[in-house]
Image (cartoon, rainbow, N blue to C red):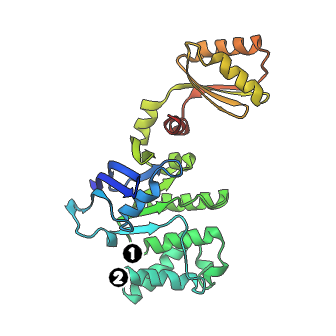
Amino acid sequence: MTLLKVDQLSKQFKQHQAVKKISFSIEEGRCVALLGPNGAGKTTTIHMLTGLLRPTSGDIQLYLQGKQVADRRPHLGYLPQMPVFYSWMTGREFVQYAGQLAGLSRQEAERRTEEWLEIVGIQDAAKRRIGGYSGGMKQRLGLAQALIHRPKLLILDEPVSALDPIGRRDVLRILERIRQETTILFSTHILHDAEEICDDIILIEQGEIAVQGRLEHIRQSHSEPMIMIETLNEAQAKALEIAIRNKPYVHHVASEHQTLRVTVSNLEEAERGIMTEAVQHHIFIRKLEAGHSTLEDLFMKVVRA
């Protein structure tokens, strides 16, 4: 059942059109990743969905049990990329405060505060002032305040971008847990996180939707044979790129330092041809791996198109 429907949504800032007539829908119970490079329009889109920005044009509709609601904001939970807290408050006080702002009674806010502090794993720090919290603890606190009123849709803007690997892992585990009851939309440029927990993706580039759909379907429809080659140094990688990029078995070559990612038509033919070119041009190949393209490869292909 459709929970959120976005139709021809646009946002213009003077001469800059940040979002250009995008349309998508989110089904209830799904986890959706909003992907795109910095400046693609992800945060602007999220600000419009949450009511923080008024769209220049287009429509946003939220449905509960198949009926459109007049005001979607009470049914949303939101965590911005850089959440700001009252540093003099304790974690417990802040979450209770957020619950009462969301319309809960004091007693219900207190009860749910204890529940969510335990779920996000900071119950032991509940009495400490937020000013002494680490970045990871603040992100967990932000999740608790966004979820205390049990929203139908949780919207997160780059929820793990500022965290270390352990903090990222912990937040992703929390998202995996709460997605059993709450629909999630989160923006990110970390492709591995999207592949790990999301059901659907919406890839935005320069304010427009480039790719959208179920992750499994996108993997199947966009997967291509690919060879990853690591040479001795960047100069050798460049020489090999020049030698193979016009070969009939090569569709596309992406280079980064001493590594090439080569999209090909036939793996066996491409492996033979690449090794032949490497020998003829005295290029030392440290590693060669054959497989199929990933979501990251699709992302880079769209961004560089």
Q: Quadrant of residue 127?
A: bottom right
What is the C-alpha distance between the residues marked 2 and 1? 8 Å
Q: Identify which residue is drawn at 77% across, 19% down.
A: 283
Q: Nearer the viewer, residue 12 or 247?
A: 12
Q: Amino acid at mark 2?
A: Gly
State whether residue 286 appears in this view: no
Q: Give the image location of residue 47, x and y in percent.
A: 41, 63
Q: Quadrant of residue 220?
A: top left
Q: Quadrant of residue 243?
A: top right
Residues packed near mark 1 inside 10 Å, few (<14), some (14 to 19) or many (20 plus): many
Secondary structure category for the residue under label 2: loop
Residue at label 1? 149
In this rendering, is residue 96 above or below 53? below
Q: Amino acid at mark 1?
A: His
Whether tag 2 and tag 1 are in contact, CB under 8 A, the answer is yes
Q: Give the left or right position of residue 279, taking residue 289 as reference.
A: right
Determine the residue located farthest toward the front in the rendered image: 15
Q: Which mark is residue 73?
A: none
Residue at label 2? 103
Residues packed near mark 2 inside 10 Å, few (<14), some (14 to 19) or many (20 plus): few
Q: Give the image location of residue 111, x and y in percent.
A: 44, 83
State whether residue 258 appears in this view: yes
Choose the circle earlier in sequence order: 2 or 1: 2
In this rendering, is residue 154 above or below 91? above
Q: Nearer the viewer, residue 84 or 26?
A: 84
